[in-house]
Amino acid sequence: MERRITIIRLRRPAEHQGNINQELQWFGESLGLFGNRDKDKSCFRIFVELLKASKQEKQLSSDDLSENLGLARGTVVHHLNNLMETGIVIQTRKKYKLRDEELRMLIEDLHKDFEKTFEEIRKTAEELDRYLGL
């Protein structure tokens, strides 16, 4: 399964510390989850809703998210697909949940994915170097 892992090095503004919404926004932006095109912060809102559900050990359908957040189902499905592509959201049956219940665990799992991907790229680079006589 292909995953898009994006890390954006953003300076963590000191004025955000202590403001949970701004901290979560920075967290997600650092992982490339929330883009500039998401003007109404719908992806962020979906992420927060899934985070709340994970604390209650619940899974949510796209209809649940649409109703809870007042978003069109198509918008919800679009963002869920993007979040699944990053590997932080998984689908079981017709429900969605965060890959891990804790953000720390989520980052650790993404780090493992990142290391495995880089190892595969490194091995391929070595093979290409040999093939090219470098």
Image (cartoon, helix red, strand yellow):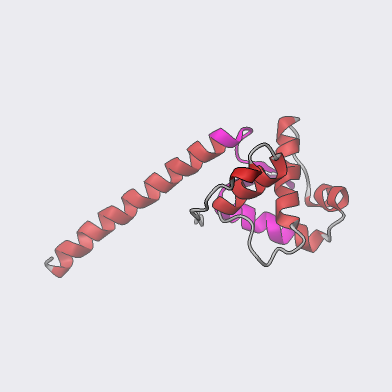
- Which residue is most to the left? 133
- Which residue is most to the top? 56
Q: What x and y, as percent, mark residue 77? A: 73, 58
**Left or right for 68, reference 32:** right
Residue at x 76% of width, y 30% of height: 56
**Left or right for 47, reference 114:** right
- Which residue is most to the front? 15
Q: Which of 47 and 73 is in front in this view?
A: 47
Q: Which of 63 and 25 is in front in this view?
A: 25
Quadrant of the snapshot with the C terminus: bottom left
Look at the image and say whether residue 98 sits in the magenta stretch. Answer: yes
Q: What x and y, as percent, mark residue 110? A: 49, 43
Residue at x 61% of width, y 33% of height: 102
Is residue 65 in view from this perspective? Answer: yes
**Left or right for 51, reference 2:** right
| For residue 122, above or below residue 92 | below
Residue at x 54% of width, y 33% of height: 105
Q: What x and y, as percent, mark residue 89? A: 63, 46
Is residue 93 in view from this perspective? Answer: no
Q: What x and y, as percent, mark residue 1? A: 50, 53
Residue at x 63% of width, y 39% of height: 17
Number of dots carrying numbers: 0
What range is drawn magenta here?
Answer: 77-104
Look at the image and say whether residue 76 sits in the magenta stretch. Answer: no
Q: Which of 113 and 39 is in front in this view?
A: 39
